[in-house]
Amino acid sequence: MSRNKGSKSEGAGGAGISRRRLIGSAGAAGATGLVLGAAGGAGGYAATSDDEPAPLTAVGSTEAMFHGKHQPGITTPLQARGHLIAFDLAPGAGRKEAAALMRRWSALAQLLMAGKPAGGGTGHDTGVALDAGPSSLTVTFGFGRTFFERTGLVARRPDALDPLPPFSSDHLDAKRSNGDLWVQIGSDDALVAFHALRAIQKEAGATARVRWQMNGFNRTPGATARPMTARNLMGQIDGTGNPKPEESDFDRRIFVPSADAPGTSGTSEGSSSSASAHEWMAGGSYAVVRRIRMLLDDWEKLTVDRQERVIGRRKADGAPLSGGSETTGMDLEKAGRDGRLLIPDNAHARISSPEKNGGAAMLRRPFSYHDGISTDGTPDAGLLFVCWQADPFRGFVPVQRKLDRGDALSPFIRHEASGVFAVPGGTAPGEYVGQRLLEG
């Protein structure tokens, strides 16, 4: 969830308008015609003048909540900038050191998401996000399979963290895959996101070292006349079929239930003792993270009509080729005048649909990426695929296996990195992420 800070009225006794206030107000008016004050979120960064800080635009003032049933960054709307970073615990670091790190990281994330400086105003902040508000910043933490070995907690490791099976499109780089700890950072401002990334890295100290790090982006909120489903770098509307929070089975598909939840006889591991051992994951979710390179030179040689048949949806508006609008359900049996299925047998949308996968579903929340152009002119670009589900072996795996057997999109993509992370539920005030695991 997110909220906009309430407006704080300007002082009436000022003799003039400061340059900083004028620039802030002009930028806000030009962007939206509406200024929402966010003095509470930005106050920690006001260091250039004794004047009251200029009001922020709606984008800067929006604050995501750190505390809650679930961690932020899962159901949060797509954010304009993202960073994914994995750490390995340093040699000699174990459960005690990991708990201290998660306590520090949680306290830091709470400050940053409120638009406050790292260190709580002690002077240890880098100043990268000076004058910015919260900008919908989210920081999400997860544990990889090897974390449980390093901390002596193998008995509490869920089966859902078992290694994924190999797929034919895999060209995985082990150095950019997996990891003991995983952090997802998202924001609607690039400097706010980088500020969080740098603060998280510094706070790791000697306890953990970076294994890999990836940068992503999405369309900026307000860049379109109305809110729209995002497009990926192939130009396709991407995410139409996502489960919706208002659907009755959304929580069951995306979040791990408590062992005593109604209708729950255990977790995906299948026994009451296992359910008890993994109760620390109640309210959490499993993230499958894949770096998927798009072979854009090959894709862009196709006509729009051919691209649409590969995907199974119209490029202009995301509507299924069987007709209607983006939100119209696919008619998988509808044929054209020539007798051919309007949505081809090997279309990506058909093969990945829940109807063709026993109801398997996952919440896709990706970022696009571009890491430069190689000497032959080929762009290193694609998708930082992040999907969320209560069990990856019931969500991601069956869908990917089906895609692996004949998806028309497969010749145009390559999976280059992979990881699965257990992301615990949210925290109450005074708690840190993973406390039920590390102190249970």
Image (cartoon, rainbow, N blue to C red):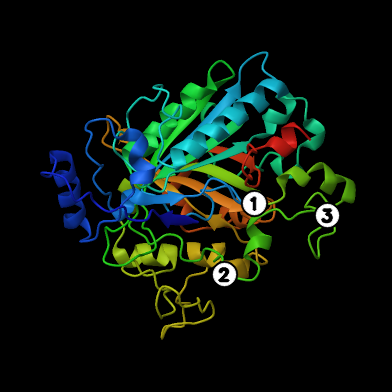
Residue at disc 2, secondary structure: loop
Q: Is residue 197 left or right of residue 305?
A: right
Q: Which residue is mark 3?
A: 266
Residue at disc 1, secondary structure: helix
Q: Earlier in the sequence, mark 3 or mark 2?
A: 2
Q: Position of residue 46 (x, y in %)?
A: 29, 35
Name the kind of residue labelled 2 in the image. Answer: Glu
Residue at disc 3, secondary structure: loop
Q: Nearer the viewer, mark 1 or mark 3?
A: 3
Q: Which residue is mark 2?
A: 246
Name the kind of residue labelled 3 in the image. Answer: Gly
Q: CA distance from mark 3 to mark 2?
A: 25 Å
Q: Is residue 69 above or below residue 227?
A: above
Q: Position of residue 72 (x, y in %)?
A: 53, 48
How packed mark 2 is, by other alpha carbons closer than 10 Å (few <14, some 14-19, many 20 or more), is: few
Could you say which quadrant of the image residue 222 lies in? Answer: bottom left
Query: In the current view of this chain or complex, which residue is farthest to the front?
Result: 13
Q: Which residue is mark 1?
A: 397
Q: Nearer the viewer, mark 1 or mark 2?
A: 2
Q: Is residue 294 left or right of residue 155?
A: left
Q: CA distance from mark 1 to mark 3?
A: 21 Å
Residue drawn at point x = 67 percent, y = 37 percent: 434
Q: Earlier in the sequence, mark 1 or mark 2?
A: 2
How packed mark 1 is, by other alpha carbons closer than 10 Å (few <14, some 14-19, many 20 or more), is: some
Could you say which quadrant of the image residue 97 lies in? Answer: top right
Residues 282 and 104: in front is 104
